[in-house]
Amino acid sequence: MKIVYASRTGNVESIINKLGVDALRIEDGSESVAEDYIIFTYTDGYGDIPGEVADFLENNSANVKGVVVSGDTAYGDAFCGAGDAIAEEYNVPVLYKVENDGTDEDIENIKNAINM
Protein backbone atom coordinates (compact mmCIF):
# COMPACT_ATOMS: atom_id res chain seq x y z
CA MET A 1 0.00 0.00 0.00
CA LYS A 2 1.18 3.51 -0.78
CA ILE A 3 2.52 5.64 2.07
CA VAL A 4 1.92 9.40 2.06
CA TYR A 5 3.33 11.71 4.72
CA ALA A 6 3.72 15.24 5.96
CA SER A 7 6.55 16.34 8.22
CA ARG A 8 7.36 19.80 9.56
CA THR A 9 9.99 19.25 12.23
CA GLY A 10 11.43 16.05 10.78
CA ASN A 11 9.85 13.55 13.18
CA VAL A 12 7.51 11.98 10.64
CA GLU A 13 10.21 11.99 7.98
CA SER A 14 12.47 10.17 10.44
CA ILE A 15 9.77 7.52 10.97
CA ILE A 16 9.43 7.06 7.20
CA ASN A 17 13.22 6.70 6.89
CA LYS A 18 13.34 4.16 9.73
CA LEU A 19 10.59 2.16 8.02
CA GLY A 20 12.61 2.18 4.80
CA VAL A 21 9.58 2.76 2.60
CA ASP A 22 9.16 4.67 -0.62
CA ALA A 23 6.69 7.40 0.24
CA LEU A 24 5.11 10.51 -1.23
CA ARG A 25 5.78 13.64 0.79
CA ILE A 26 2.98 16.16 1.07
CA GLU A 27 4.52 19.56 0.47
CA ASP A 28 1.54 21.87 -0.04
CA GLY A 29 -1.50 19.61 -0.31
CA SER A 30 -1.79 19.78 -4.09
CA GLU A 31 -0.32 16.30 -4.57
CA SER A 32 -2.58 13.48 -5.72
CA VAL A 33 -2.74 9.73 -5.21
CA ALA A 34 -4.90 7.39 -7.29
CA GLU A 35 -4.33 4.25 -5.21
CA ASP A 36 -5.06 3.12 -1.66
CA TYR A 37 -2.76 4.73 0.88
CA ILE A 38 -1.97 5.22 4.55
CA ILE A 39 -1.26 8.76 5.66
CA PHE A 40 1.44 9.61 8.21
CA THR A 41 1.11 13.05 9.75
CA TYR A 42 2.19 15.24 12.58
CA THR A 43 -0.20 17.08 14.86
CA ASP A 44 -0.35 20.84 14.53
CA GLY A 45 -1.27 23.37 17.21
CA TYR A 46 -3.35 21.81 19.95
CA GLY A 47 -4.50 18.62 18.23
CA ASP A 48 -5.13 20.10 14.78
CA ILE A 49 -4.74 18.62 11.32
CA PRO A 50 -1.90 20.44 9.51
CA GLY A 51 -3.15 22.70 6.72
CA GLU A 52 -1.33 20.90 3.90
CA VAL A 53 -2.69 17.56 5.14
CA ALA A 54 -6.25 18.90 5.27
CA ASP A 55 -5.87 20.22 1.71
CA PHE A 56 -4.42 16.90 0.53
CA LEU A 57 -7.22 14.88 2.12
CA GLU A 58 -9.90 17.13 0.63
CA ASN A 59 -8.72 16.06 -2.83
CA ASN A 60 -7.63 12.49 -2.05
CA SER A 61 -10.05 11.17 0.55
CA ALA A 62 -11.46 8.30 -1.51
CA ASN A 63 -8.37 6.11 -1.12
CA VAL A 64 -7.21 6.83 2.45
CA LYS A 65 -7.27 3.60 4.47
CA GLY A 66 -5.70 4.62 7.78
CA VAL A 67 -3.59 7.14 9.63
CA VAL A 68 -0.37 6.99 11.64
CA VAL A 69 0.16 10.12 13.68
CA SER A 70 3.03 11.72 15.57
CA GLY A 71 2.60 14.04 18.52
CA ASP A 72 3.96 15.11 21.87
CA THR A 73 2.53 13.70 25.10
CA ALA A 74 3.12 17.10 26.74
CA TYR A 75 -0.09 18.20 25.00
CA GLY A 76 -2.16 15.83 27.14
CA ASP A 77 -5.59 15.15 25.63
CA ALA A 78 -4.49 16.76 22.36
CA PHE A 79 -1.71 14.14 21.92
CA CYS A 80 -1.92 12.98 18.30
CA GLY A 81 -5.20 14.82 17.91
CA ALA A 82 -4.72 15.20 14.16
CA GLY A 83 -5.00 11.43 13.79
CA ASP A 84 -8.21 11.33 15.81
CA ALA A 85 -9.68 14.15 13.71
CA ILE A 86 -8.73 12.45 10.42
CA ALA A 87 -10.12 9.12 11.63
CA GLU A 88 -13.43 10.71 12.55
CA GLU A 89 -13.78 12.87 9.45
CA TYR A 90 -12.79 10.19 6.93
CA ASN A 91 -14.02 7.08 8.79
CA VAL A 92 -10.62 5.37 8.86
CA PRO A 93 -8.71 3.79 11.74
CA VAL A 94 -5.88 5.38 13.66
CA LEU A 95 -3.30 2.67 13.09
CA TYR A 96 -0.70 4.01 15.50
CA LYS A 97 0.07 7.02 17.67
CA VAL A 98 3.73 7.76 18.23
CA GLU A 99 5.56 10.34 20.30
CA ASN A 100 7.89 12.44 18.16
CA ASP A 101 9.93 10.10 15.91
CA GLY A 102 9.33 7.00 18.00
CA THR A 103 11.47 4.30 19.56
CA ASP A 104 12.71 1.14 17.88
CA GLU A 105 9.73 -0.62 19.45
CA ASP A 106 7.37 1.97 17.96
CA ILE A 107 8.84 1.40 14.50
CA GLU A 108 8.26 -2.36 14.81
CA ASN A 109 4.71 -1.73 16.02
CA ILE A 110 4.07 0.60 13.08
CA LYS A 111 5.39 -2.04 10.66
CA ASN A 112 2.93 -4.51 12.15
CA ALA A 113 0.07 -2.00 12.10
CA ILE A 114 0.55 -1.23 8.42
CA ASN A 115 1.28 -4.88 7.53
CA MET A 116 4.86 -4.45 6.36
Image (cartoon, rainbow, N blue to C red):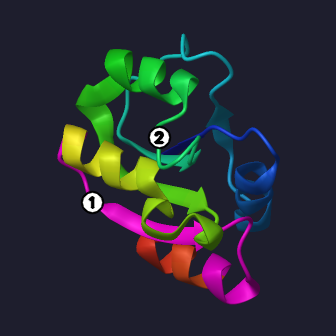
Residue 53 drawn at (x, y percent): 51, 29
Residue 110 drawn at (x, y percent): 54, 73
> Which residue in the rendered view is the most extreme toward the bottom?
105
- The residue at 56%/22% (across/down) is 52
Residue 90 drawn at (x, y percent): 22, 39
Q: Secondary structure at mark 2?
A: loop
Describe residue 65's horizontal placement relative to residue 83 as left or right: left
The total number of labels drawn is 2
Residue 7 drawn at (x, y percent): 71, 41
Q: Are marks 2 and 1 in contact (CB under 8 Å)?
A: no
Q: Which residue, given by chain and number where applicable, does mark 2 sit on?
A: 48
The magenta segment: 90-107
- Residue 114 in view here: no
Q: Which residue, given by chain and number where applicable, does mark 1 sit on?
A: 93
Give above or below for 100 relative to 10: below
Question: Which mark is on residue 65?
Answer: none
Give yes or no for residue 101 being in the magenta stretch.
yes
Give above or below for 49 relative to 70: above
